[in-house]
Amino acid sequence: MKFASVATILSALSLASTTSAFTTPRTHITTIAAGNAYSRSYNTYLEESTLEGENAEDTAGEETTQEQQVPAPPVAVAVESSIPRTPPRTATTKITAERIEKATKERPYPLFLAEKAASILPSFESDTYYPTNTQKERIIVLGTGWGAASFLKSIDCNKYDVTVISPRNYFVFTPMLAGASVGTVEFRSITEPVREINSKVRYLEAAATEVDPKTNTLSCVSIVCEGNSCETEEFQIDYDRLVFSVGAQTTTFGTPGVEEYCNYLKQVGDAQQIKNAIVNCFESAGLPGLTEEDKIKELSFVIIGAGPTGIEFAAELLDFIEENGARFYKELLPYVRIKIVEAAPSILRPFEDGMKEEAIRKLTRRIEIEGVPSLQPLEILTNKLVSEVSGNYVYFKDGEKIPYGMSLWAAGIGQLPITTNLIGALGETEQKDAQDYARGRIAVDPWLRVIGGDGKIFALGDCSCVSSSPMLPATAQVAAQQGEFLGDFLSKDYCIDEMDDKLLPPLRRNPGQSKPLSDKIASFAMGDDEIAPPFQYLDLGILAYTGSGSALAQVQIAPGGGLPGDNENWDPVRLQIKGKLGFGLWRSIYLLKMTSPKNAVLVALDWIKVKLFGRDISIL
């Protein structure tokens, strides 16, 4: 019986907001085009694959179409597994371009909502196939981010031997890193050890350095310490299937000085460093002998990037100054300057114009503190391109420069070296051609299988790009949905390997076997009862905290005209919530999306503690 988490229920109802192993033989790949009407057009070869059984002779003489125009990139299809499978089906099933295109089209929104709602109901139907022998396929999961955590929650460990490899042995609730960086919540309140997310998985503290798809081998490096002496140790591990969910890193776009002088906000260590830097700035400004100009420079905080990360950090910093500044640094508050720098014409690009205006109004508000002149410390600078960052100044391409005491770079993300390594290791496969639209991300098919990866490698989250849909945003919401999908998909009884020497889209192993209600709805929406439902993203909305107990919540309640990714015609119906009501929704959703009840309780207690006693300013 399967029960949904509280967070999943809220998402569906609200509609808001990484020892010994064994390898398997490598087989030839047949590519089958998949996609929908708005996929990019590619010329590709399609072999009309036939699943043969008792009446194989009836189809042996049929001609196959050698070349067709199909409106989608090629899709790599899975290979044979080391696990013994059930006998091949006896029915003859033709996999044609039209059938695949129909199955991979976006399912109608009302039916997709019904499918998601049905997935949270307890299911007494089981369509999971368990091997008859004791040998399980080994799945290696790279990463411990949103995609990996969701995958670990939904994967069936009775079917697979799951090993997680990551230098970080915990999951971090990244939307609350901004609050942690000023002491609104404690760091341990927003982290969850991998072993607690799924106690049946094995964890190896190491970093992957190279993937070899030809030998199904992963090269890793770990740090081994004995006493005060530490050294690196390299090892290799084999996999049957690889779940590549390493995420992304902050990119500097080659801007000089960013790596040396700017802070990032991607990890717990980043938030800890920022918290110490903020307090250090105030302590330095309080030293004797400083001029007013020196104090302003020390207390100038420059935030480069006006996306959700930059805006929420600015809001949390403003709260710290308004709520706790007078208690600790009252005489220094008139010297505080917060500057948000954005290269685009506006902030918070995913939000509607009215919501952006509300965010600007809240962020640039005047702060009234008893005994201190009226303050308006925050300024937003748009259309400003950073050319260089030095130890004391941020320089712009228009010739202007501003001094700073602390700077935060929140201007974009780029791919990790291991991601680039995997794309290169796939060599002259379909992945090379797919890079025309994936642009540095790993291109995957509608079932998240890496194109050119022989069906043994899956990728999800910020490091991946689904070939059959427009580029999805690099958000925690997308990664979490992909992780949940992939865990459920691999746990069910779909034949993702070759059958009768044919490489096909994922098919039901036993079409007559009962399946959950959600799968029945998906099959009806697809018009196909055999092909596995592909991944489809459900936009639950976006949230942003704007300070002083106010937040923005933009919730998509119905799709509009056009298609996702088409900025001119895509016009979904959105519900806009702001102010105190938005703040209540922001806190409620974040609490319910915590990985465990323990984290939710700890975060709630942190909020109460800050309200009663203020934020801690210890430099640790």
Image (cartoon, rainbow, N blue to C red):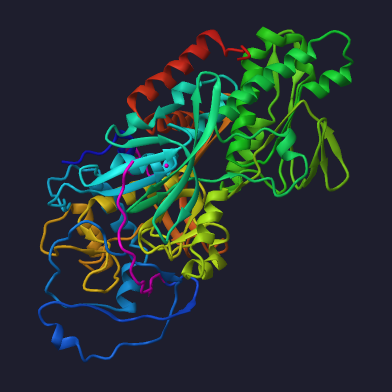
Relative placement, left or right, of 345 versus 269 is right
**Residue 138: image location, x then y, percent:** 30, 48
Residue 114 visible to an observer of this rendering: no
**Residue 29: image location, x then y, percent:** 36, 71
Task: Answer above or below: position of 240 versus 582.
Answer: below
Residue in the foreground of this view, choosing between 413 and 117? 413
Which image quarter holds the N terminus? top left
Q: Quadrant of residue 513?
A: bottom left
Magenta segment: 10-36
**Residue 278: image location, x then y, percent:** 68, 21
All told, the count of numbered labels is 0
Which image quarter holds the C terminus? top right
Residue in the foreground of this view, choosing between 420 and 247? 420
Residue at 27%, 91% in the rendered image: 63
Residue 528 visible to an observer of this rendering: yes
Residue in the foreground of this view, choosing between 337 and 78? 78
Residue in the foreground of this view, choosing between 339 and 397? 397
Task: Answer above or below: position of 444 versus 411.
Answer: below
Task: Answer above or below: position of 196 versus 619.
Answer: below
Q: Is residue 414 magenta?
A: no
Relative placement, left or right, of 509 versus 207 is left
Residue at 74%, 25% in the rendered image: 377
**Residue 365: image location, x then y, percent:** 68, 27
Q: Is residue 25 magenta?
A: yes
Residue at 38%, 24% in the rendered image: 600
